[in-house]
Structures are given as structure tokens and as C-alpha cells.
Amino acid sequence: MDTRPIGIFDSGLGGLCAVKAVFKNLPNEDIIYFGDTQRVPYGSRSEKTIEAFASDDIKFLEQFDCKLIMAACGTVSSVAVNAAAKIKEPFVGVVKPSCLAAVRATKNGRIGVMATSASINSGAYEREIRRLSPRAEVFGVSCPVLVTLVENNWIDEDNFISKEIIARYIKPLLDEDTDTIILGCTHFPHLAPIIQSVAGAGVTLIDSGFEAVMQAKKMLEENNLENEKSHIGTARYFVSDKTQNFSMIAKTLLGTDISDSVTFSETAR
């Protein structure tokens, strides 16, 4: 048994989909979450900048002696490979587990990826899918505006503006007859109900945050790093900009008020 917390980081609110999955599937684990809200979004930055930001985020979490660190950020998982390689603790990103889930889910071998510009341009998802299934066909689309929709809480299923934006982004994937779509940025699962309604019931959506948590669960079990079964997990949240907006939107995304658990703290720059 290991009572140390799990560290989770993202550029902003997106990684809360992973936090929600931890609550449900790893209820005994404590969480330290860092959202770099001062510098969101990461997806439009250069690889050098993303590497630097990821290193800062990792250093921040390492202050808490985390037993596992999760990059609940598709951009970091796709681009910041050097920063991830330096982590001393067990590490989980979102690319590999999401690709594995997609390969297992697809029936026609045509897989779509919705992600940030940096993730799509890196080719990380396509390389991993082809490694797992050489015959698979991969179609990627950059969806930078979706990050802004989530960061501004435009996630209601009845929001016609969000639905129209999503419809425009997803059309090229549907035109290619993709039957499985990876939501490759952790902001995007928060829009999953709208995306599913546009894509149709015949398309399977892969929640990158959930898949990363399932991989983390497996790693904790295999390495005897689980917390005590009697322990009720807690969560502490740190953000690099004002806490009020984060807390307000997080209440919607998580379904609970976390305002008393959110603290302002800059990254370890």
C-alpha cells in the first residue's frame, strides 16, 4: 500500500475529466491537480514552449511526493516527450491508452482523432495507432476552438453555437466513414454529449482522460501502489491564475463544489 497522492496536470480545466474518472474508479486515491490556467491553451504553442511548460508543471507536482504523475493533456502527451522521459515517478499520458482503446473499439479500421493543432501536427496519435494496427487508417482534425468552449463553460447540450462549431470540425471525419473517434484533448470529453449527438450513435467516442486513468489503475495494482481500501480519497487543486473562474466551471464539470479546495500557485518556474 502507498498513501502518497496521484499528481495530475493539464493546461487548464480539461484534465478534470481524468479527476472525475479517478473519483469513480480509484475512490481510495488522493489527488493533487495542477491546472496551468495562466498559460492555457498549450495546443497552439511551439514544441519548445510546450516542453518548457510541461517541465514546470511536473516540477510543481513533484513537490508533493506523488507516487504517479499523469499528463491529463493530449498536447503534452503528444509533444513533450523529453519532459515526460525525465519523470522519476511512474508516468501516464493520454496518447497510448487512448489509441489502444480506439484500436480495440473500431470495426472498420477507420479511426478519427480530434485534438489540438500541436497534437495533430506531432503525428503522435497516428504513429501509435499504426504501431498497434498497421492496417488502420487514421484521420486527424485540429479543433482549437473546443478548448475555449470548455474553458468558458459552453458545454450545455442545447448550446447551438457549440454544436455548430463541433459539426464543422467533425464533418471531415464523418465524411471518411470513421466509426471511432479519439477525443485527444482532455477538454473535449466535457463536450462528449454534443459530439455524440452530432456524430451519431454509430460512432464510438474514446475519452482520453478516462483511458489514462484506467492505465494508471493498472499500474498501481501491478506495482502495489494502491492506497488503503478504507481510505476515502481527497483532492486538492492548484491553478496558476485566479481561482474563482476555475472553481465555478469545475462545479459544473465535476458536479460538486470544490471552491474550498482550490489554491492559487504558480508553477515551479
Image (cartoon, rainbow, N blue to C red):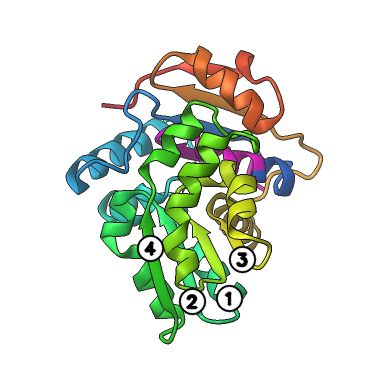
Q: Would residue 189 be visible to someone looking at this image? A: yes
Q: Tell me the kind of residue under disc 4.
A: Gly
Q: Residues within 10 Å of mark 2 (few under 14, many from 20)?
A: many
* Element type at mark 2: strand
Question: Where residue 211 sits: x, y (%)?
Answer: 58, 57
Q: Amino acid at mark 1?
A: Thr
Counting other residues with Cα less than 10 Å from the Cα at mark 1, is it few (<14), some (14-19), or many (20 or more)? some
**Above or below, 52 relative to 109:** above
- Tell me the element at label 1: loop
How far apart are the alpha carbons under marks 3 and 2?
11 Å
The magenta-colored residue range is 1-20
Left/right placement of residue 128 relative to residue 193 reads: left
What residue would you read off at disc 3? 203
Question: Which numbered tag is attached to residue 202?
Answer: none
Location of mark 1 (residue): 106
SS of the residue under disc 3: loop
What percent of the width, then of the height, locates residue 36? 39, 29
Q: Are marks 2 and 1 in contact (CB under 8 Å)?
A: yes
Q: Nearer the viewer, residue 263 or 182?
A: 182
For image coordinates 45% across by 72% down, the residue present is 176
Element on which disc 4 rests? strand
N-term mark: 3 or 1: 1
The kind of residue tagged 2 is: Arg
Residue identifier under label 4: 140
The reply to whether residue 80 is visible in this rendering is no
* Residue closer to the observer: 213 or 193: 193
Q: Check disc 2 and report the residue beneath it.
A: 110
